[in-house]
Image (cartoon, rainbow, N blue to C red):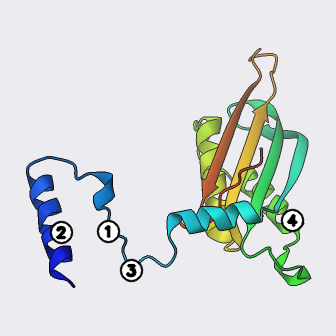
Amino acid sequence: MSNFSRLLGLYIIILSFLGINAPNFFFIPSSALAKPLTSISQECNLHQESFGFEFSDYPIEHQGWALLNISVKYRLKNTREINPDIYPDFVPIAKRIEQFLVEYPNETDYWEVVNRNLAQMLLNEYSDLTSIRIYINVNHTLNERYTRHSEITLTRPGSCPLTHS
């Protein structure tokens, strides 16, 4: 490490100790970073391939009876090459969502909480998914005159997000 780098580091430490933010031009890139953030976002913009499926008029008992329309969209790891082995069949994912909804333990959770837990569960269980967006539309009922919805998007750290709506 050069003397200049040491002095610059000391200068930044002193400024932060005094509560003064160091100017942006004193940014020191870390060699520990595998890829700079701009490189990741450029790579993400060069190629995006997303997949999705929907449940239409899905009846469920949660906080009373409800009729849901669910839209699921996801992005996979490494979809640059055309390889049938990297494209998972969506049916097991859809069946897992149905199982999750039927077995959901907390009847008092709002749909936003259910949706967040569902999205997190899918990221945890399906390692090939890098980003997922789930839109749950809860149709009005005789007891609830408002149609409402919840939308959640989760992306693994360091992965490409879903950018298409």
Q: Secondary structure at mark 3?
A: loop
Q: Label 4 neighbourhood size at 10 Å, few (<14), some (14-19), many (20+)?
A: few
Looking at the picture, which amino acid does disc 2 mark? Gly
3D distance between C-alphas at marks 4 and 1? 44 Å
Looking at the picture, which amino acid does disc 4 mark? Phe
Residue shown at 81% from the left, 21% from the top: 141
The numbered mark, 1 or 2, whose residue comes first in the sequence reads: 2
The numbered mark, 4 or 3, whose residue comes first in the sequence reads: 3
Residue shown at 32% from the left, 62% from the top: 27
3D distance between C-alphas at marks 2 and 3? 15 Å
Q: Position of residue 134 (x, y in %)?
A: 73, 47
Q: Secondary structure at mark 4?
A: helix
Read off the residue under disc 1.
28
| In this picture, residue 118 sits left or right of residue 76 | left
Q: Determine which quarter of the picture holds residue 62.
A: top right
3D distance between C-alphas at marks 4 and 3? 39 Å
Q: Position of residue 106 (x, y in %)?
A: 58, 44
3D distance between C-alphas at marks 2 and 4? 51 Å
Read off the residue under disc 2.
9
Looking at the picture, which amino acid does disc 3 mark? Ser
The numbered mark, 2 or 3, whose residue comes first in the sequence reads: 2
Q: Secondary structure at mark 1?
A: loop
Q: Is residue 21 above or below residue 90?
A: above
Q: Are marks 1 and 2 in contact (CB under 8 Å)?
A: yes
3D distance between C-alphas at marks 1 and 2? 9 Å
Q: Label 1 neighbourhood size at 10 Å, few (<14), some (14-19), many (20+)?
A: few
Read off the residue under disc 3.
31
Q: Position of residue 75 (x, y in %)?
A: 75, 62
Read off the residue under disc 4.
90
Q: Nearer the viewer, mark 2 or mark 4?
A: 2
Q: Is residue 86 above or below residue 38?
A: below
